Image: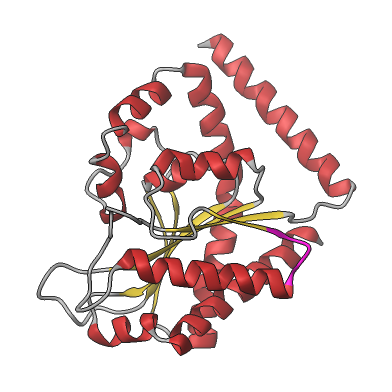
Amino acid sequence: MRQKTIILFTLISLFCLSNHVSRAQGYRIKTIVIDAGHGGVKPGAKGRYSYEKNVALEVALKLGKKFEKELPSIKIIQIRKTDVDVDWYRRAEIANDAKADIFISIHCNSMPKGNHTTRGTETFVGAYRRINEMDAGLKENEDIINDKNYKNKEEAIVTDPEELIKLSLYKSLYRAKSLSLAKLVQKNYTELNKRVNRGVKEQGLLVLQRAAMPSILTEIGFISNPEEEDYINSDEGQEEIVNAIFKAVSEYKKEIEN
């Protein structure tokens, strides 16, 4: 236990020092990873006529193009550009390998059959627990829990004490920035798009668990609500969603770079 404490203290000290140096040298957001939720054989939530995987992909691609046009100095990496399934752990690995500054996962919300009135947006940051303590019942975790690779990946992660210490450190240090970005996203959904604000929440979402950077998962609307399904499938609705997320990231960028 003493050795783990020393390791943790050392990692915190090194991180704080590197963070101070990067600020002194002028920190800039260089890379953003955009993750269109689900894909391929994992369609996600289903509305009357559309699937979450397709709506998320359309919004993710449009968001990427918006960044490339308005902020060309930032490198944009799309987790997927077509209707394919990307393993949950690969999504974070792609972001980590790219040394991304922000990870944004796009999803659509849904309610149980029979509830067609719930509406609004909500944005999540990870509740940073061990992976085997994640919320198995959460909708966005269902595909992952059922993945044939999940058990092997879960065991590989939780049996390495040093890895767990580092993971816990990363998450606690990035939590504040993740919350800041999430709050800005929700603010802009409300102010720009007049959407119902369901708030920022911390939950055990596996897709965020391994991302070593400020990370959010944003639910852009309820596909189970006919009006919202029409909205999130429309060109106008998707443009408004993209503009809200883009403005939020721009405000976050200004906040942490100055």
* Res. 150 image quadrant: top left
Residue bounds of the magenta highlight: 71-75
Q: Is residue 249 above or below residue 133?
A: below
Give whichever of 40, 136 is nearer the camera: 40
Residue 147 located within the stretch drawn in magenta? no
Q: Residue at x 40, y 43 (%)?
A: 88
Q: In the visual, does 205 lie left or right of 162?
A: left
Q: Residue at x 78, y 36 (%)?
A: 18
Give coordinates of residue 222: x percent, y percent. Answer: 30, 75
Q: Residue at x 26, y 55 (%)?
A: 139
- Residue that extends furthest to the right in the rendered view of this protein: 25
Q: In the visual, does 216 lie left or right of 224?
A: right
* Res. 40 image quadrant: bottom left
Q: Of helix, strand and loop, which mostly describes the magenta segment?
A: loop
- Tell me if I can see residue 194 in this picture: no
Quadrant occupied by the C terminus:
bottom right
